Image: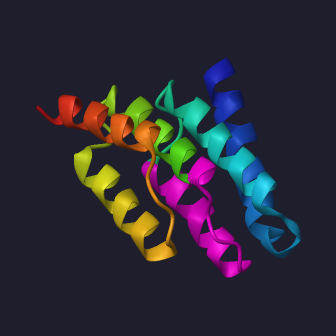
Amino acid sequence: EKEQERESRRQALLASAAGKSAALDGVSYNTLMQICAAEGKFNQSTVEDGAAVFRWMEAAGIVPSIASFGSYLSLLTNLAAHGSASLRHGLEALDWMARDGVAPDTQIFNACLRLCSKDA
């Protein structure tokens, strides 16, 4: 029952953020991504939740930062532990980073390596 309550709150937060995307700044979007990543530990967030945050950022004219991508890859590695994400998702994130001109750092590459180990 607690899990259902958490899921309802998370969904409400994401829905509320989607409706107010023009009023949020980069820090707000990064915080949403961190929430998705934390929920991924319990397999209560999805790859699509994280991708939605990126779409909202783009719609608001905000370019995701290295922190945004780091949180997204954290979500992916947490979900991979439950079989809900794969290396393919990590490679897509690297493509998004290249598109946005964000250079991956060691943490990003390490997260992709962790995804490799989950795909094996």
Q: In this view, which residue lies farthest toward the top? A: 2
Q: What colour scheme was applied to this rendering of the protein? A: rainbow
Task: Indicate left or right for 31 with 99 as reference.
Answer: right
Q: Residue at x 33, y 33 (%)?
A: 80
Q: Image check: 47 left or right of 16?
A: left
Residue at 47% x, 56% y is 48
Q: Nearer the viewer, residue 92 or 109?
A: 109
Secondary structure, magenta segment, majority class = helix
When asked about the image quadrant of residue 109, the answer is top left
Q: Is residue 12 visible?
A: no
* Residue 66 inside the magenta-drawn segment: yes
Residue 39 placement: quadrant = top right
Which of the two residues, 109 or 89, is positioned nearer the viewer here?
109
Residue 12 drawn in magenta: no
Q: Residue at 35%, 34% (x, y): give it.
A: 110
Using the image as rendered, state which of residue 28 and residue 112 is in the foreground: 112
Task: Please tell me which residue is depicted at 51% across the width and 33% down the height of the picture.
Answer: 40
> Residue 26 sits in which quadrant?
bottom right
Q: Is residue 113 above or below residue 90?
A: above
Which part of the image, by quadrant, shows the N terminus?
top right
Q: Position of residue 96 (x, y in %)?
A: 42, 68
Q: From this viewpoint, is residue 112 visible? A: yes
Q: Is residue 90 above or below residue 8?
A: below
> x and y percent of residue 115 in the render?
28, 36
Q: Position of residue 58 (x, y in %)?
A: 63, 76
| Count of number-bearing discs | 0
Segment colored magenta: 47-68
